[in-house]
Image: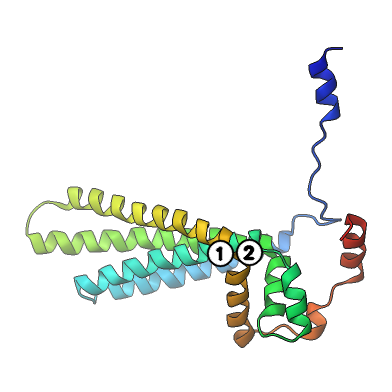
């Protein structure tokens, strides 16, 4: 037996210990339904407003859709990188937003899916539709057949702003993940605060943490 084969046998890849957690089909169905209604709502707003506003307002709407995608991408990255440990003492002192932050971190997979995939993808689709509407406006103002060139330039600009903004936001999210989630938790505490019984760990969670050495 060669040294390489011996070394391969010694290497073991350990998966994350998440107990008996499985894929939640209920969550998959729920997020599909939510995506449909949120996408339809945002598209309705975009379509209804774009035909009635000036070019400047249309550009501001497009920028707001891009910004929404970037902000939610920052939240999605932050929640997967954040640690709930610093929030336990804050929750014990009943600091606003701490319990909500813990709940977000414990549901990081669902929160990340909602922020990055649902809102992020919908914002991208709506931005594309808004870009098309702006191209039509600009083409009518120029009184020429420049639609093809305008669509290429604007599509490239929107893509550059989106990707560049998300790349910049990811760096901020990783460096300030706990602070970002804490602030999001504060906002959620005004909308849907966590009750004391919801913030307590279940016996199964405590047993799992003890087995992992926490």
Q: Picture coordinates of residue 3 (x, y %)?
A: 82, 16
Badge 2, how many Cα within 10 Å: few under 14, some, many 20+? many
Q: Nearer the viewer, residue 195 or 8?
A: 8
Q: Nearer the viewer, residue 43 or 98?
A: 98
Q: Residue at x 17, y 52 (%)?
A: 147
Q: Picture coordinates of residue 120 (x, y %)?
A: 49, 61
Q: State the residue position of label 2.
A: 79
Give the label on residue 115, or none: 1
Q: Residue at x 51, y 61 (%)?
A: 172
Q: Quadrant of residue 69?
A: bottom left
Number of numbered tags placed on the structure image: 2
For residue 127, side relative to residue 88 (left or right): left
For residue 14, side relative to residue 109 (left or right): right
Q: Picture coordinates of residue 67 (x, y %)?
A: 41, 66
Q: Are marks 1 and 2 in contact (CB under 8 Å)?
A: yes
Q: Nearer the viewer, residue 2 or 113?
A: 2
Q: Picture coordinates of residue 64 (x, y %)?
A: 37, 70
């Amino acid at each position: 037996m060669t040294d390489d084969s011996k070394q391969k046998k010694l290497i073991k890849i350990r998966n994350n210990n998440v107990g008996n957690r499985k894929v939640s089909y209920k969550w998959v169905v729920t997020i599909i339904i939510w995506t449909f209604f949120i996408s339809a709502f945002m598209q309705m707003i975009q379509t209804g407003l774009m035909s009635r506003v000036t070019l400047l307002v249309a550009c501001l709407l497009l920028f707001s859709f891009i910004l929404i995608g970037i902000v939610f991408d920052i939240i999605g990255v932050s929640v997967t990188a954040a640690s709930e440990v610093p929030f336990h003492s804050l929750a014990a002192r009943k600091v606003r937003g701490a319990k909500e932050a813990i709940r977000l971190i414990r549901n990081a997979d669902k929160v990340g899916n909602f922020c990055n995939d649902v809102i992020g993808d919908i914002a991208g689709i709506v931005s594309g539709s808004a870009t098309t509407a702006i191209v039509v406006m600009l083409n009518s103002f120029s009184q020429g057949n420049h639609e093809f060139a305008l669509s290429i330039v604007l599509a490239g600009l929107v893509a550059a702003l989106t990707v560049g903004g998300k790349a910049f936001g990811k760096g901020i999210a990783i460096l300030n993940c706990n602070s970002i989630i804490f602030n999001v938790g504060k906002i959620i505490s005004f909308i849907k605060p966590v009750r004391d019984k919801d913030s307590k760990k279940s016996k199964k969670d405590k047993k799992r943490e003890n087995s992992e050495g926490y």
